Image (cartoon, grey):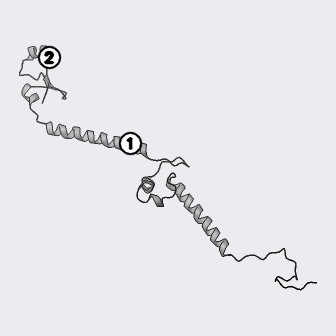
Amino acid sequence: MPVVVTTVEQFQKHGADAAVWRRLGRKDGQTLTAALDNPDGDALYRRQYARAEVKDERCRAAEREARRPVCKRCGRKFTDQRWEETTGRTAWKAGDVSVCGTCHTDDVAREETAAEAARLQAAAPPEPEDDQEPGRGRGWFRRRP
């Protein structure tokens, strides 16, 4: 429902047929029939709706950034990919969910290096013990001097 207003001074000075009527939400004075008519109502609605959508999108983006986790180790915010890894269905494979992708990669590399070192150590032949006296027998039955 359009709301139109004018002042008594303008009404008396110019008359009811002049562009003295002001429709609320518009900037200029209009004639009474133009003010009551809604020639650009749909366009105005679309512009207002588009502005509201942009504002809502910005608000949603700001809320999402406020919820974005921060790495406990380095303090950087998680990337979208790391955030999805730690909260999605694959969270059980994500490792420590309190660290960012870079710190997680460092952890994985450190674990792989430690596992490789342990594997190499287990595969190496045992070194002979040097504390035995040369010439002594090693079995249960040995000759006594």
Nearer the observer, 77 or 145? 145
- Asked which quadrant contains residue 111, the reply is bottom right
SS category of the residue bearing label 1? helix
Quadrant the N terminus occupies: top left
User: Would you place residue 17 above or below residue 132 in this image?
Assistant: above
Say which residue label 2 marks: 7
- Determine whether, in the image, residue 46 is placed left or right of residue 100: left
User: Would you place residue 8 above or below residue 99 in this image?
Assistant: above
- Determine whether, in the image, residue 47 is placed left or right of residue 110: left
- Asked which quadrant contains residue 37, the reply is top left
Say which residue label 1 marks: 63
Name which residue type carries label 1.
Glu
Q: Residue at x 11, y 36 (%)?
A: 39
- Where residue 143 sits: x, y (%)? 89, 86
SS category of the residue bearing label 2? loop
Query: Residue most toward the front?
Result: 141
- Determine whether, in the image, residue 47 is placed left or right of residue 128: left
User: Would you place residue 30 above or below residue 47 in this image?
Assistant: above
- Where residue 2 sits: x, y (%)? 13, 29
Q: Nearer the viewer, mark 1 or mark 2?
A: 1
Name which residue type carries label 2.
Thr
Quadrant the C terminus occupies: bottom right
Q: Earlier in the sequence, mark 1 or mark 2?
A: 2
